[in-house]
Image: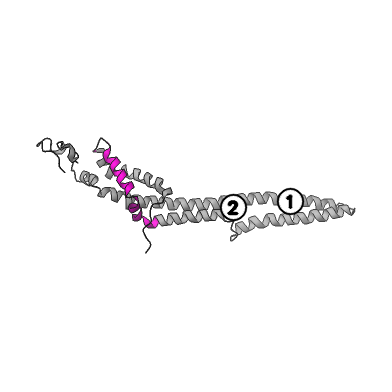
C-alpha cells in the first residue's frame, strides 16, 4: 500500500484556497461568526495549515492522480512531437513531400534552362517548384501550430480536470471533516458558547444571566 501523499509546496496555494472556501461554508461559518474578534477563524485556519499533510492524505487518491497528470504533461512538453496518430503524421509528411517535390522540380527546371531546352517546359517546372515550396512552408507552419495547440490544450485540460477533482475531494474528505471535528466548531454546532481563556477569569457570556462563576473550561 502506498504511503499517504504529503502536500507538495507548489500545491499549498490551492490548499489555502480550498481552506478559505471551507471556512465560508454554512457549517463552519456559524462558529466563525460567533466570535466577533476573528480569533476563531484565525485559529481554525492555522490549525488546518499545521495539519496540512494529514488533511491531504484524506484525499490521497485524487491528489496522486492530479500530480501524475501534471508530471506527465510536463514530461510530454519536453519531448518532440509524437507521430503515433494521423494528424502528426500528416503534419510532418505534407510539407516534407511538398518540399521534396519542389526541390526536384526546381532542380530539373534549372537544368533544362541551363541546357537551353526549347519550349515552356523549363519555366513551368521552375514555377511549379516555387509553388510547391510555398505550399510546403505554409502547410508546415499551419501543421505545427495545430499540433502544438492540440497537444498543449489536451494536456492542460486533463491536468485542470484532475486538479478540480482533487480540490473537491480535499474539501469534502479532508478540510471540512477536519474543521468539523475542531472543538470550536463542535461546540458551536451543539449550541455551546465558548468561554474566555482560563487566564482571564472572565464570566462566561452564556452564564452571565445566571451566575458570575469565572470560566475555567
Check disc 2 and report its element: helix, strand or loop: helix
Quick one: 126 or 55, which is closer to the camera?
Answer: 55
Position in image of residue 7 (x %, y %)? 39, 52
Q: Is residue 56 magenta?
A: yes
Magenta span main SS:
helix
Q: Is residue 159 visible?
A: yes
- The image position of residue 145, as x and y in percent, is 61, 49
Q: Is residue 4 above or below residue 20?
A: below
Closer to the chain start, of discs 1 and 2, is 1
Q: How many marks?
A: 2
Answer with left or right where residue 72 lies relative to residue 217: right
Q: Which residues are magenta?
A: 34-62
* Colour pattern of the rendering: one colour
Which mark, residue 133?
1
- Closest to the observer, 83 or 70: 70
Q: Residue furthest left?
A: 211
The quarter of the image holding the C terminus is: top left
Q: Percent from the top left, x then y, of residue 61?
A: 38, 58
Q: Position of residue 87 (x, y in %)?
A: 60, 57
Residue pushed farthest front? Answer: 199
Residue 94 is left or right of residue 4, and the answer is right
> Is residue 195 among what the camera can see?
no
Q: Which residue is mark 2?
A: 147
Say if 66 sits above or below 209 in the image.
below
Element assignment for label 1 = helix
Out of 197 and 21, give the one closest to the viewer. Answer: 197
Say if mark 1 contacts mark 2, CB within 8 Å. Answer: no
Q: Residues within 10 Å of mark 2 (few under 14, many from 20)?
A: some
Residue 27 drawn in magenta: no
Amino acid at each position: 500500500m502506498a504511503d499517504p501523499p504529503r502536500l507538495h509546496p507548489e500545491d499549498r496555494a490551492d490548499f489555502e484556497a480550498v481552506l478559505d472556501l471551507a471556512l465560508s461554508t454554512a457549517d463552519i461559518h456559524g462558529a466563525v461568526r460567533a466570535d466577533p474578534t476573528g480569533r476563531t477563524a484565525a485559529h481554525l485556519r492555522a490549525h488546518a495549515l499545521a495539519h496540512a499533510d494529514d488533511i491531504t492524505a484524506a484525499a490521497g487518491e485524487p491528489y496522486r492522480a492530479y500530480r501524475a497528470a501534471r508530471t506527465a504533461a510536463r514530461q510530454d512538453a519536453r519531448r518532440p512531437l509524437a507521430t503515433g496518430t494521423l494528424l502528426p503524421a500528416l503534419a510532418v509528411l505534407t510539407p516534407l513531400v511538398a518540399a521534396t517535390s519542389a526541390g526536384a522540380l526546381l532542380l530539373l527546371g534549372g537544368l533544362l534552362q541551363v541546357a537551353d531546352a526549347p519550349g515552356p517546359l523549363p519555366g513551368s517546372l521552375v514555377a511549379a517548384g516555387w509553388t510547391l515550396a510555398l505550399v510546403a512552408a505554409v502547410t508546415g507552419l499551419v501543421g505545427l501550430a495545430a499540433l502544438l495547440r492540440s497537444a498543449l490544450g489536451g494536456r492542460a485540460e486533463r491536468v485542470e480536470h484532475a486538479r478540480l477533482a482533487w480540490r473537491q475531494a480535499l474539501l469534502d474528505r479532508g478540510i471540512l471533516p477536519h474543521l468539523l471535528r475542531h472543538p470550536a466548531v463542535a461546540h458551536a454546532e451543539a449550541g455551546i458558547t465558548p468561554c474566555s481563556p482560563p487566564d482571564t477569569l472572565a464570566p462566561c457570556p452564556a452564564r452571565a444571566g445566571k451566575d458570575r462563576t469565572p470560566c475555567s473550561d
